[in-house]
Image (cartoon, grey):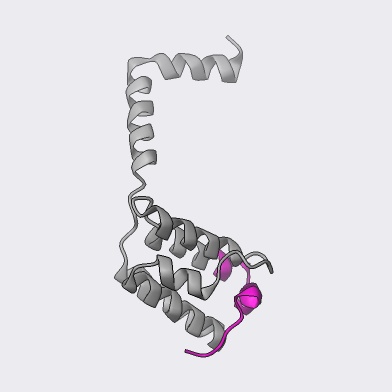
């Protein structure tokens, strides 16, 4: 793997849309909250896409990520060292290889909100907030 400085990671993208897409792939496809340390380091890497600060190092990623996810991150780094077209290819391959991670907290909260909405409690609260009555 070529040497790549993760502090200049943010400068390797074609535009803001591509950087956002990579961030969402890291967030939605790789960062699983059931694996807390793995999730934490992937989210640090995602935030590093927007800053020159060193949130995470390659050594930390290697220690805390599983083999498949670390390989996906290595592939991203290689693509970023190459070209924006290679980053597009990484996005396509990673989306095909990893399903969207189900956010269990959001799913549980969403079910509760739907239940309250059906019972009319949330509708009444929403009417009060929205209309003041």
Q: Residue furthest top?
A: 133
Residue drawn at point x = 42 percent, y = 69 percent: 63
Residue drawn at point x = 33 percent, y = 16 percent: 119
Viewer-proximal residue among 83 and 35? 35
* Residue 24 visible in the displayed image: no
* Residue 59 visible in the displayed image: yes
Q: Position of residue 7 (x, y in %)?
A: 65, 74
Q: Position of residue 123 (x, y in %)?
A: 44, 18
Q: Position of residue 127 (x, y in %)?
A: 52, 16
Image quadrant assignment for residue 130:
top right
Quadrant showing the C terminus: top right
| Main SS, magenta residues | helix
Whether the magenta-drawn stretch holds residue 3 is answered as yes
Q: Position of residue 126 (x, y in %)?
A: 51, 20
Residue drawn at point x = 51 percent, y = 65 percent: 21
Viewer-proximal residue among 52 and 89? 52
Q: Residue furthest right?
A: 52
Q: Is residue 128 above or below residue 23?
A: above
Q: Tell me: 112 left or right of 45.
A: left
Q: Is residue 99 above or below residue 132?
A: below
Image quadrant assignment for residue 104:
top left
Residue drawn at point x = 39 percent, y = 40 percent: 106
Whether the magenta-drawn stretch holds residue 82 is answered as no
> Over which residues does the magenta segment extend?
1-20
Q: In this figure, what is the number of numbered marks? A: 0
């Amino acid at each position: 793997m070529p040497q790549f400085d993760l502090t200049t990671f943010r400068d390797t993208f074609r535009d803001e849309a591509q950087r956002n897409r990579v961030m969402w792939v890291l967030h939605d496809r790789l960062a699983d909250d059931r694996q807390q340390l793995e999730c934490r380091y992937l989210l640090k890497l995602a935030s590093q896409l927007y800053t020159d600060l060193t949130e995470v190092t390659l050594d930390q990623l290697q220690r805390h990520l599983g083999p498949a996810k670390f390989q996906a991150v290595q592939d991203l780094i290689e693509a970023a060292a190459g070209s924006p077209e290679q980053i597009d290819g990484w996005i396509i391959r990673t989306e095909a290889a990893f399903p969207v991670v189900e956010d269990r907290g959001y799913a549980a909260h969403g079910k509760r909100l739907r239940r309250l909405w059906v019972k009319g409690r949330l509708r009444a609260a929403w009417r009060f907030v929205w209309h003041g009555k």
